[in-house]
Image (cartoon, rainbow, N blue to C red):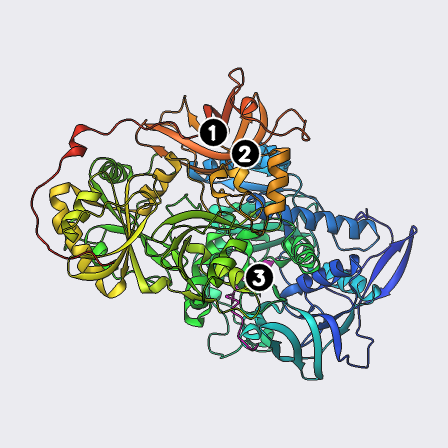
Amino acid sequence: MFSSKTLVKKYRLSHNVSFLVNLNNSFFHCKKPKCLYSTFPTQARVVIAGAGTVANSVAYHLAQSGWTDVVMLEQNQIGSGTSRFGSGTLGLFKPIAHRNLIMYSIKLYKKLQEMGYDIGLKQCGSVYLAQTKDRMLALKRRMAYNIPTGLECELMDGDMLKKLHPFLQVDDLEGGVWVPQDGVVDPKSVCNVLALLAQQAGIRYFENTCISTVLTKNRTVDEVVTSRGNIKCEFFVNCAGMWSRELGLCSTPPVQIPAYPVAHYYATTGPLQEIVDESIPIVRDFDSNTYIREYDGGFMVGWFDNEAQPVFEDHNTIPVDWITHLKLNMEKLNSLWGSAKNRIPALTQCVQPEYVNSPDNFTPDGRWILGETAEVTKYFVACGMNGNSLQGAGGIGKAVAEWIIEGKPTQDLLPFTVQRFLNIHNSRPYLKQRVREVVGRHYAILYPHQCEYKYSRNLRCSPLYSVLEDRGAVFGIKMAYERALYFDSTYKKGQPKPCMPQGTFYKPKFFDFMKEEYMACRESVGIIDMSSFSKIEIKGNGSDALNYLQIVCSNDVDIPLGTVVRTGMQNDRGGYENDCMMVRQTETDFFMVSPTSQQTRIYEWMNRNLPTKSSIVLNDVTSMYTVINVVGPKAPDLLKELSNSDLNLPSFCYKKVNLGYASDVMVMSFTHTGESGYCLYIPSEYALHVYFQLMEVGLDYGVRDVGTLTQRFMRIERFIPFWAEELSSFTTPFEAGNTYTVRLDKKEDFIGKQALRKQKEKGVFKQLVMFHLKNLDPEVDIWPWGGEPIYRNGLFVGNVTSAGYAFSSDKLICIGYMRRSDNNEGIPLTTDYILNKESTYEIDIAGHRFLATPYIHAPALAPRSKNSNYRPTVTRYTSDIST
């Protein structure tokens, strides 16, 4: 690897036209990548829009796999977008999904440096600072799950931090964490080296070429229309950076890519009087929204501002000459610079720092956008880098290239898939508001389930929203849908609306409200608005819909009319593509209920798996129905009184009834909580009427509004695995304990059947397990919230995926996947191994290990009180059962 002290002078690409390469211990001058092709192609296997770091990484990795019939189209010049800017920092102290991609990026950049390319890579490490006790807890929690998965971390006090970084002012710090594997690299150099290597492999680059649209045939990529002619292609990859969203909207049909550029400021000092060692660690001062690194003998200081400014607001499109339209907010920058000087007093030696506005695309949730789009098959996206395209570029390029080649993801990319959004997320006004706070959230303490967005709210609302707000609801959002998290029972109409209190890693401040809600569901009746769940009708002629569903569902859906079955939809690996309830309404029609976040993703997956020349129609009817969950032992009597009829519905059955004056209400006998009761699917125009009748008549039954956080704790207590937490494309029903949702004996060769059959024969190598924490005091100890490492006999075996409070046993509980800890990876995991009485289990929460008892089935709950058997006799409404 090159050292910065090499006697031969080396030039970084960010300052020069050429750079040095060391091959066979000799330096060679290599020209900056140029486009050498004069003839514009009319056909290619893959066309990639953009020639920044991410685009070049995708091209490089395609070429590494032998895919070289690739054309790169850049509207300006290679690396002329924001790839040439940025901090160049590489940080690994992140959630596992992000870290895996960044880890590969660092591995790739090491390889490039070892090949002789001077890309300025230095693994100088980072110090992550904590100014408050809560920040220190957040760092300890992150340490706990990063260390057992291979990241070197060390907890430090102020003196230790000062020794590592002599320029630091540490008097106000609670401590920090040292991560030695972090580093820095020159952004422009990486961008150009990847482009050079891609070109050397045969990939063709064309600069000054604008794309006007992407044409499709049967909703599949067909042709790219450019300023230099049209190109037929099989795959299209949108890596257009700030222009990704606009380019997506130019395709036919439009592709939704919700990302918008935001001002991202940094400053450089130039050389200082005091010598700044280039190996000095990066400083990440989260509580000041600041990062600081050595740069050219001085420092670079950058910020992730709490109130960031969207750029180009006075333009209808992102200008090609974007750099000439950028502005500096000097009032804000002077304030930020003053804060940075408090942390590094040596910055006072710089009289006038050089400020740079380096905008980048930010997404509505602050995560990258990757993968195949919902609207167009073989149209891929890699954009929305959220302030640092460099650190993810290597891993993202590899992941997208493999997805294109294999036709499916080769690793779990669910947190980043473009199909996690709806069209409404791509609204320009929505994005411009949301990204203002997304920037600062990168450095904020995100207390689990207690940190909701403040901008771009009240967009998707249930008809019950205003009523629930007046009844003390505190709302959160899922898929832009406002959902009541819990209800403040002390709230009186006319008072200021209740809001989420200051977050905590301990017992939440709204715990008592949740306990009241839980007891209503256990002892009387709880009412939960669950309208956000995605709903799809599947209809066809004759047996078309049934035959189709038997192929895409792993359970047997050839069920009697008026019944419901829980089923998965699997991929070829046997992993989940969906977890749903399937209702058979008629011989030809079905109704499917899926998780909220699946609304876009599963509709497109099902659509792409439709047989050709089929009569089947898929209808997304999510907004047509308001869903009220009526939970608890008194729910049957409440509905009996409202309908003036005994529903007499066994579990997992369905019937249309009249409730109050409302007709055609679909009643389904399941609750998503593990408790008894019903889900009411109400035509939305009747929702308020039905809700008011439930609450009025329900007074005699102890009815209470219940939030989704209580519903979450109830499903964890019942050991019900949940989408995107326990269930993903890389977990199977047998691993998740959902064996009952798979019918290997049905005659149809459903998707994933062979993989599941093979797994059943060989056994599983990871298993979802429930843990009850034993020596944790919920009143004084830190709580588990998800991500915590699981230890068996002192050895790491997995991570917690969900955690909550079991009100019935007054214990904190966790769910998580575990593997064997004895290095016998070829031996299946067994019940005896998991429940071995001589084994000791612990859950590590922020560095403190708590003893835990494992379960492979949920323990029986404590019996209900005698009051739950109360039955009123008043009848207020009369109506007929609708058949």
Q: What residue did someone put label 1 on?
A: 856
* Quarter of the picture holding the C terminus: bottom left
Q: Mark 1 or mark 2, which is nearer the start of the sequence?
A: 2
How far apart marks 2 and 3 lie (CA) works out to 58 Å
User: Which label number is shown at residue 767?
Assistant: 2
Q: Mark 3 or mark 2, which is nearer the start of the sequence?
A: 3
Q: Mark 3 or mark 1, which is nearer the start of the sequence?
A: 3
Are there few (<14), some (14-19), or many (20+) residues within 10 Å of tag 3? few
**Which of the 4 quarters of the picture holds residue 510?**
top left
Q: Is residue 259 magenta?
A: yes
Where's residue 105, x and y in %? Answer: 69, 51
Callout 2: helix, strand or loop? strand
Callout 1: helix, strand or loop? loop
Are there few (<14), some (14-19), or many (20+) residues within 10 Å of tag 2? many
Asked whether the beta carbons under mark 2 and mark 1 sit within 8 Å of each other, the answer is yes
Seen at 14% across and 55% down, the residue is 494
**Which of the 4 quarters of the picture holds residue 688?**
bottom left
**Which of the 4 quarters of the picture holds residue 155?**
top right
Which span of residues is magenta-colored? 250-268
**Side of 323 where 491 appears, left or right:** left
Q: What residue did someone put label 3 on?
A: 352
User: Which label number is shown at residue 330?
Assistant: none
Q: How many marks?
A: 3
